[in-house]
Structures are given as structure tokens and as C-alpha cells.
Amino acid sequence: MQYQTLGESTYTWTNTLNYLEIPLLLKINVTKTVGFYTGGFASKLLNAKVRVNGPPDVDITALMQIKEDYGTIVGINYTVNPSFSLDLRLVQSQSSLNSDSD
């Protein structure tokens, strides 16, 4: 993200959020080559850092309000051959990173 205030220089913000995410999926094969996924996930924030105009990184893990998250996953799978398949998944979090209530 970049921000600029009149009469001042441009500031570049880089946020890095690292989560451990554990999915639980059910796959239903419709044909030999097409299948559908549905399920959910749970995740935990491992660390969060912010960088303003380059190094050094500032650890902001303790300031983060959302440290655990959960959500839903749906998807489709296409098997090209036994050793290669393609997945398309939609992951929807149940939490918002925006802490504003309005």
C-alpha cells in the first residue's frame, strides 16, 4: 500500500501475515475425471510484521486482534491422468481483517 500526505514524501507499507492453516475436505467424485470438494479450515496466526519504506520489519503479532480464523472451502477437481490433476478452490474466511464494526 502507498500513502502520500501533501508536502511530505510517499510511504510504502508492506504487511506480512503468516498463518498455519489446517483444511478438512470431503471429495465427491462425479466421474472418473471430475470431483467436487467441500469442507472447512481452521487457522492460527503465527506472526505478523509490517515494513515501512523498506527494512527493518516491525513485529506486530501482539497487536493483531484476529489470531484465529475459520471458514469454508468449495472446489472442483479435474484429473488429467493418474499422476496429474487440476484443482480450483474458493476459500471464504468467516473473519474480517477490518476491525471497524460499521
Image (tube, rainbow, N blue to C red):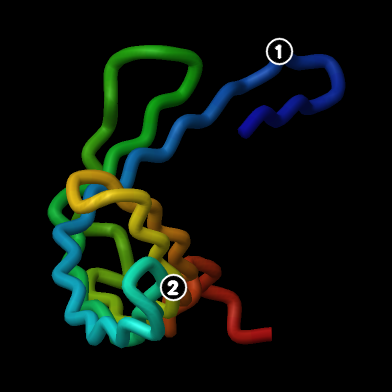
Left or right: where 44 falls relative to 85:
left
* Left or right relative to 34: residue 43: left
Residue beneath disc 2: 75
Give the residue type at disc 1.
Ser
* Mark 1: few/some/many CA within 10 Å (<14, 14-19, 20+): few
Q: Residue at x 42, y 13 (%)?
A: 54
In this rendering, would 86 be left or right of 96? left
Q: Residues within 10 Å of mark 2 (few under 14, many from 20)?
A: some
* Residue sitting nearer the eye, 45 or 84: 84
Q: Is residue 85 left or right of residue 4?
A: left
Check the picture and name the quadrant holding the C terminus. bottom right
Viewer-proximal residue among 5 and 101? 101
Q: Position of residue 87 (x, y in %)?
A: 39, 58
Q: Position of residue 100 (x, y in %)?
A: 59, 76
Q: Is residue 81 above or below residue 97?
A: above
Q: Where residue 78 appears, x then y in whole percent?
A: 41, 61
Count how many numbered circles sit on residues in the image: 2
Reading the chain from its start, which is encountered first: label 2 or label 1? 1
> Hey, which residue is sitting farthest right in the picture?
6
Q: Is residue 29 above or below residue 58?
A: below
